[in-house]
Amino acid sequence: MAFDFSGYKVYDLKGRLIGEREGTPGDVPHFQNICDAIRDGAALTQEIAEGQKSTLWCHLGNIAHRTQSTLEINPKTGRIKNNPEAQKLWKRSYRKGWQPKV
């Protein structure tokens, strides 16, 4: 599988086109690398633990934005403390029978 995109368009909140760009988005090489690693055993270009840290900050930023609150984070676990509304967004709810099993 290869990822190939021809570009993207950006719209404002009223649906007006405000920009566009041709070419492959910057995340495509990362997607291609993980697929190559899974299928062919290729070396990862990013250590999993480092990628998890980057992803965690993105998720926490989205949760803070959605709850319009400042988050207090447990530095050892990365989990949200003292904010029940934000903690609800920490995980998703699944329909019965569709819960992931690790």
Image (tube, rainbow, N blue to C red):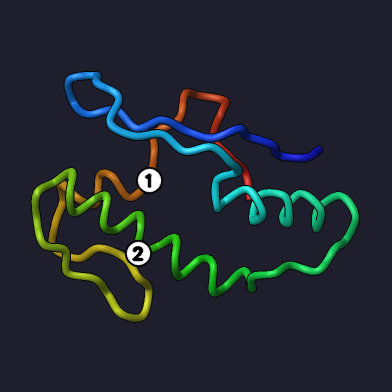
Which secondary structure lies at badge 2?
A: helix
Q: Position of residue 76 (x, y in %)?
A: 36, 80
Residue ID at (35%, 58%)? 58
Q: Is residue 73 above or below residue 28?
A: below
Decide which of 11, 77 is in the foreground and name it: 11
Q: Is the residue marked by circle 2 packed among few (<14), some (14-19), or many (20+) residues within 10 Å? A: few
**Residue drawn at (72%, 55%) of the image:** 34
Residue 79's x, y, as percent?
31, 65
Q: Secondary structure at mark 1?
A: loop
Q: Quadrant of residue 10?
A: top left
Q: Amino acid at mark 2?
A: Trp
Give percent across and percent down for residue 74: 27, 75
| Image: 47 above or below 70 | below
Horizontal arrangement in the rendering, residue 100 relative to residue 9 (left or right): right
Q: Quadrant of the N terminus?
A: top right
Residue 94 to residue 83: above or below:
above
Q: Earlier in the sequence, mark 1 or mark 2?
A: 2
Where on the picture, by quarter, is residue 48?
Answer: bottom right
Q: Which residue is mark 2?
A: 57
Q: CA distance from mark 1 to mark 2?
A: 15 Å
Residue reaching furthest to the right: 40
Say left or right for 8 vs 71. Answer: right
Q: Residue furthest left?
A: 69
Front label number (1 vs 2)? 2
Q: What residue is rendered at 57% in x and 73% in y?
A: 49
Query: Mark 1 packing: few (<14 Cα in 10 Å), some, or many (20+)?
Result: few
- Please state the horizontal and vertical placement of residue 26, each as a whole percent of the image: 55, 52
Q: Tell me what residue is drawn at x 62 percent, y 44 percent.
A: 101
What residue would you read off at disc 1?
91
